[in-house]
Image: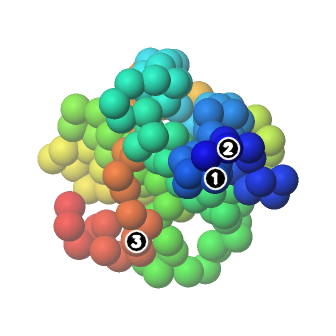
Amino acid sequence: MNNTLFDDMNVTLEGELSRGASNKALERIRKFLSGIQYRILRSNSQSGEECEFFRNKIVEMDKLISSMPKTYEQDGKGNEAIVYLHYFKRNGDWYITEKDMEVEQLQAFGYVKWSGYDGELGYISIEELRGNDVELDLYWTPKTLKEVKSKR
């Protein structure tokens, strides 16, 4: 069967996601990933047994991040605000409800929870998370802030 890509789709005739489409999606979400996580996703999406899984996951994350509200777009929702992204490292969890309205994505708004401490809403530096190799949870399912707070 021919592997020609459809003009407006990122899927080959066999139904596999193209490498080019996942590479483009990975570049779009790169500003949300630590250097280590970026390199691992890039490597695992290029070849190997699970490359199709990683390609699909990258495109899924790209769609989620693209659809996220920007700063102040969930203002006033309180605990009903949707948490779109989750970062984690050791005893810390960062829950992102809104991405930066700026293209650079230097900060976001969300909820931070350290083990043993009450959580706090505020601005979160995406640059600091990336620089400290805090991992973006690729298996996170968006949920309300109320749900997040009730589980922690």
State the residue position of label 2: 2
Does residue 141 appear anywhere in the picture? yes
Nearest to N terminus: mark 1 or mark 3: 1
Does residue 65 appear anywhere in the picture? no
Three-letter amino acid code at the position of disc 3:
Lys
SS for dot 2: loop
Residue 51 position (above or below residue 56): above
CA gap, disc 2 to disc 1? 7 Å
SS for dot 3: strand
Crowding around mark 1 (Cα neighbors within 10 Å: few <14, some 14 to 19, many 20+) is few
Crowding around mark 3 (Cα neighbors within 10 Å: few <14, some 14 to 19, many 20+) is some
Q: Which mark is residue 99?
A: none
Q: Quadrant of residue 92?
A: top left
Q: Quadrant of residue 136?
A: top left
State the residue position of label 1: 13
State the residue position of label 3: 143
Q: Nearer the viewer, mark 1 or mark 3?
A: 1
